[in-house]
Each structure stands twice: as structure tokens, then as C-alpha cells.
Amino acid sequence: MVFQLKQAVEGIIPRKYLRVWGMYTTRFYGIFLSGKKHQCSCCKKTYNRFLSYGLKKRENALCPWCLSLERHRLMWIYLQEQTNIYTDQVKVLHFAPEHQLQEHLSKQPNIDYTSADLDMPTAMVKMDITNITFESNTFDVILCNHVLEHIPDDAKAMSELFKVLKPGGWAILQTPMSKEAKTIEDVTLTDPKEMERRFGQNDHVRIYGLDKKDRLEAAGFEVVLDDFVTKLPKEVVEKHYLEDDEIIYLCKKPK
């Protein structure tokens, strides 16, 4: 329902206002879902269930209060429990910033935070991911989630991210995934309906297969496939409505 409403109004409401509109709309719906059974790990609000979302509707996907999806709630927990992002002095580059994370990370006293995107109005810097203008070896941490599937020259984008990451630094580079061995892509497609049919969204040019690791390694990264979510207690996964099979692509730059 929410996803279909979003699609309907995208051509009417300017993009910079769309998230605000969506947030107030879902918060209204959230009144009818109040309860203590489940909690969003990002905003800490509790509900009996979350809202459904997606072209192929996923139940209990969208937090009515902060609009987090399953991947955002998992990332929030992962950053807290598995990384040094809150304990060390770090310089962070965040591409296509999720607003929950941007609001939170930008306020942390130990984090020198920069968000970037070519089109997103909430990003601090307007920048093409295939032409990152920061100097080499600038950032300790890079967050770039659900971006690369939009980029025709993803090899160039991966190379640019590797370039600006410091030796010994790490990046989390999440994308939609299939279980196929090979990535399926067609960067020549321009028909949104065909892109949606083949890749799951009308502005995607590929859906990554298991060879995504090879593609990242070709850019220079050491890639750790972290099945962190499978190690969480079942009650934690259910409490926050996490996808129980998402793999974290933790990409490190050798020292």
C-alpha cells in the first residue's frame, strides 16, 4: 500500500518533499499499529507490526515512524555491534544517505561525517560516485547501500570508492541480490517498465549475483561476506523484523 502510494505521487510531489510527505502519512497509519510486540532498532518506536512495502509486497517491512526498512534496521545493529564507528575517531563518507543514519551519525562527536549523492537533496555534497573528487586515502569508513545497482559503470564506482578509502579502512557496500551465480545486467535499457521487470525497480540496471564479491575484489577490496544476522538470537530478528538471510558485504582496503 505505502509503496504504491509512493509510486503514485512521485510525479506530483517534488522529490525533496516526498520523504516528509511519506513520513507524516505513515505516522498516521502507525496510530493503528501501536503496541509493544516489535521495535524499530533505528527510532526505538514500538508497534504490533510494521507496514507492508515493495513492488512485491513484503509484510512488516516499513517502520511507520522513521521509514526504516529491514536493511536499515540490520545496518543500525551491525554498526553498533560489529564496527569501530562509535568507538574510534573516524572520517566517514556516506553515499545516498539513509536519513535515519545520517541524522544519527552526523551528531556523533567522534565522527567527521560527510554525505554525498548526485541527486539526493538531503546529501551534504553533490557528487557523482563515478567521479569522487575527494583526495585518495581520505576516509576511514564508507557507507554505500543500494546505490551500485543504479550505476551503469559500477566498476568505476567501486574503483572510486576504493581510491578514497584509507588503507586499513572499511566500507559496507550493500545491494539487492539474487542467488544466481552471475550478475544480470543491461546498461542499455531505458524502458522503466522493462527495467522493473528484469531488475526489480524501474531505475535499476542490474541485479547482482554471487559474483558481486569478484567484482569488488577486482577493484582492490578484500571482501568479507558476513552472515551476522544468522548469529543474532531469533527473538532479536523477530523483534526488529530483520531479513534473516541478508549478507553484509564488508569491504576492506589492505594496509
Image (cartoon, grey):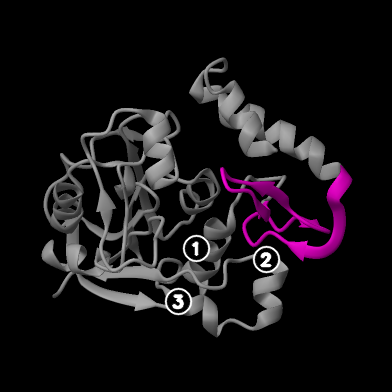
Q: What residue is rendered at 62% in x and 38% in y?
A: 3
Q: Which image quadrant is residue 55 in? A: top right
Label of residue 240 in the image: 2
Q: Which residue is mark 1?
A: 75
Residue 205 at x, y percent in the picture: 30, 42
Structural distance between the alpha carbons of marks 3 and 2: 17 Å
Label of residue 110 in the image: none
Residue 190 at x, y percent in the picture: 29, 28
Local secondary structure at mark 1: helix
Mark 1 near mark 2, Cβ–Cβ under 8 Å?
no
Screen quadrant of the C terminus: bottom left
Question: Disc 3 marks which amino acid?
Answer: Gln
Mark 1 near mark 3, Cβ–Cβ under 8 Å?
no
Label of residue 82 in the image: 3
Local secondary structure at mark 3: helix
Structural distance between the alpha carbons of marks 1 and 2: 12 Å
Residue 71 at x, y percent in the picture: 52, 59
